[in-house]
């Protein structure tokens, strides 16, 4: 995803002299193509994310289209006050790019995990929150955010994520992509969990269950019609994300379903529990701790049982069926 973003940004900057890229002393071995081609529009602000965000807001208010870049929490939580007051309050044309979100940097520990960012950023006024599912969506999302006026957040993995979309797909901010149709359950995935959701849909199909799969690349604004149609046309909805169970895609979908008051819809969240153990491991390790997606879907479809979503205080890896 990171490579797809940088390549696309270089293509855009070639045609639009307003585009700037600011980094918080990160992105080495990734951002060099932009820095070498557009040195006057590339700024390494150092390990000073608050300053980076303030400079970005100032450039944006001078007519520039500014992308800020760093790892996971650093361009978001470390400078949240500046994002809120300098960028969002003024509707500044700043696009925040966080790489290595979720547990991509799993071995670096909790300080490098981006697992609350969707929940926090989507509460900010005027902020568009975009979490592409593969490199194809990353390229399309980068272009869309560059053309959009106002604050944006681009949530990326790192590198090596598989390409899911083998054919051209329609892309519009706020509109989910129908990856495949189905009638029993709808999987709604956001971010780098898309490939895992595809694998789960294949496994469910082999067991006789028809799964609709939506790539909800934009969490804010949420594609409400896609969610409501899924609730009306399939028996259950399961959200899939590498993010805390609180505040992310699952919370957004749950709130919509509750407000709509649709009877009989079964719902579950496949996400990280609120309480993380002080463990260190790979991204694959953390995903195993989230649980088995196929088992979660089968349980929520079972008329006699329901799967408990991860909840506060429930140790990771020890969630029980309820």
Image (cartoon, helix red, strand yellow):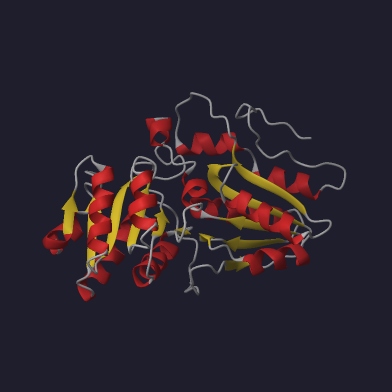
Q: Quick check: 54 left or right of 124?
A: left
The location of residue 248, given as percent across then percent down, is 56, 48
Q: Quick check: 222 left or right of 131?
A: right
Q: Quick check: 3 left or right of 116?
A: left
Q: Which residue is drawn at 51% across and 34% down?
A: 285
Furthest-right residue in this view? 304
* Looking at the image, residue 234 lies above or below residue 302: below
Q: Which of 120 and 166 is in front in this view?
A: 120
Q: Quadrant of the C terminus?
A: top right
The location of residue 271, given as percent across then percent down, is 59, 43
* Looking at the image, residue 161 lies above or below residue 321: below
Q: Quick check: 22 left or right of 214?
A: left
Residue 55 visible in this rendered orientation of the protein: yes
The location of residue 228, given as percent across then percent down, is 70, 65
Q: Nearer the viewer, residue 45 or 85?
A: 85
Furthest-top residue in this view? 278
Q: In which quarter of the image is residue 113?
A: top left
Q: Residue at x 26, y 56 (%)?
A: 56
Q: Which residue is drawn at 17% across and 53% down?
A: 43
* Looking at the image, residue 188 lies above or below residue 111: below
Q: In which quarter of the image is the N terminus?
A: bottom left
Q: Nearer the viewer, residue 303 or 146?
A: 146
Q: Residue at x 63, y 32 (%)?
A: 312
Q: Which of 313 and 207 is in front in this view?
A: 313
Residue 159 visible in this rendered orientation of the protein: no
Total numbered labels: 0
């Amino acid at each position: 995803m990171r490579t797809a973003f940088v390549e696309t940004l270089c293509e855009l900057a070639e045609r639009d002299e307003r585009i700037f890229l600011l980094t918080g002393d990160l992105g080495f071995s990734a951002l060099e193509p932009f820095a070498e081609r557009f040195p006057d529009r590339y700024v390494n602000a150092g390990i000073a994310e608050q300053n980076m965000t303030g400079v970005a807001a100032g450039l944006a208010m001078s007519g520039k289209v500014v992308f800020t870049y760093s790892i996971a929490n650093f361009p978001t939580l470390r400078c949240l006050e500046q994002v809120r007051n300098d960028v969002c309050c003024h509707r500044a044309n700043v696009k925040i790019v966080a790489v290595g979100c979720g547990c991509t940097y799993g071995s670096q520990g909790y300080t490098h995990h981006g697992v609350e960012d969707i929940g926090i950023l989507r509460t900010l006024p005027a902020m568009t929150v975009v979490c592409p599912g593969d490199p194809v969506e990353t390229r399309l999302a980068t272009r869309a955010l560059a053309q959009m006026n106002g604050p944006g957040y681009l949530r990326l993995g790192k590198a090596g994520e598989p390409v899911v979309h083998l054919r051209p797909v329609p892309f519009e901010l706020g509109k989910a992509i129908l990856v495949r149709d189905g009638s029993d359950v709808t999987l709604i995935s956001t971010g780098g969990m898309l490939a895992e959701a595809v694998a789960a849909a294949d496994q469910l199909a082999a067991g006789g269950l028809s799964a609709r799969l939506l790539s909800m690349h934009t969490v804010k604004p949420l594609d409400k019609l896609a969610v409501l149609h899924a609730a009306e046309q399939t028996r259950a909805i399961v959200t899939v994300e590498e993010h805390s169970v609180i505040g992310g895609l699952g919370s957004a979908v749950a709130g919509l379903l509750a407000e709509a008051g649709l009877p009989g819809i079964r719902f579950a969240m496949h996400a990280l529990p609120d309480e993380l153990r002080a463990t260190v491991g790979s991204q694959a390790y953390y995903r195993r701790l989230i649980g088995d997606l196929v088992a979660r879907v089968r349980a929520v479809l079972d008329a006699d049982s329901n799967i408990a979503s991860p909840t506060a205080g429930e140790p990771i890896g020890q969630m029980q069926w309820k």
